Each structure stands twice: as C-alpha cells, then as structure tokens.
Amino acid sequence: MDIEVNRMSPSTMELLDQLSVVCKRFNVDYSAASEKDRFFVEAVALHEYQLKKAHEQGLKRSEVPPFLGLKRTDRSNDMPA
C-alpha cells in the first residue's frame, strides 16, 4: 500500500495558524479539548479567518457569514471587515 502525502495549501496553513492563535487566546489545548471547546475555537478561528480575507479584498462584514449564525446589526454589516 502506497501512502501519498500532499502539501497543505497556503490558505489551509493560514487557517491553522489562526486556530493556533485562538487556542492560545482562550487557553485551549486542542488535542486534549472537549468536543464543545474544539467546536468553539474552530468556529472563532474560521470566522476570524473569513473576516481577514474579506478585509484584504476590501469587502464589508455583510459579505462574511455571521459568527455561529448570530444576527448582525445593520451598523455592523456596513463596517469594513
């Protein structure tokens, strides 16, 4: 059986870096974390990554899915990402 290993894409590496930052911020050891804690830090990291990418493209927050589906105010939607 041959095992093929592929290099991760730059965007995947950026997302994993963001996950690491979020884990440090919330003092979460990802490998030992509960499913609930993993879900939370993954959601925060993904949202922050999406906001960063939208900001780089000059988009508004309304272009990024809201965090965990929470409703945003119109004021927040009009702000830059």
Image: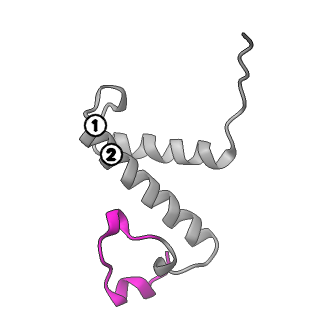
Does 46 appear above or below 4?
Answer: below
Q: Which residue is mark 2?
A: 39
Q: Is there any visible trace of residue 55 in the rendered image?
A: yes
Could you give the CA–CA distance between mark 1 and mark 2, rounded to whole angstroms? 6 Å
Q: What is the x, y in percent for residue 15?
A: 54, 48
* Span colored in magenta: 65-81
Residue 27 visible, this angle: no
2 or 74: nearer the eye? 2
Q: Alpha-carbon neighbours of circle 1 within 10 Å: few (<14), some, or many (≥20)?
A: few
Task: Kindly indicate whether the residue at mark 2 contacts the one at mark 1 (C-beta within 8 angstroms).
Answer: yes
Dot 1: element? helix
Does 37 lie within the magenta span?
no
**Screen quadrant of the N terminus:** top right
Tell me what residue is drawn at x 39 percent, y 70 percent. 66
Q: For the image shown, how many numbered marks are present on the structure?
A: 2
Of the residues shown, which amino acid type is indicated by label 2?
Answer: Phe
Image position of 33 with respect to 44: above or below: above
Give x and y (percent) for residue 16.
52, 42
Q: Residue at x 64, y 50 (%)?
A: 11
Marking on residue 18: none
Q: Which residue is mark 1?
A: 35
Position above or below: 68 against 25: below
Amino acid type at circle 1 is Glu
Residue 69 is a magenta residue: yes
Report the coloring of the rendering: one colour
Relative to 29, 4 lies left or right? right
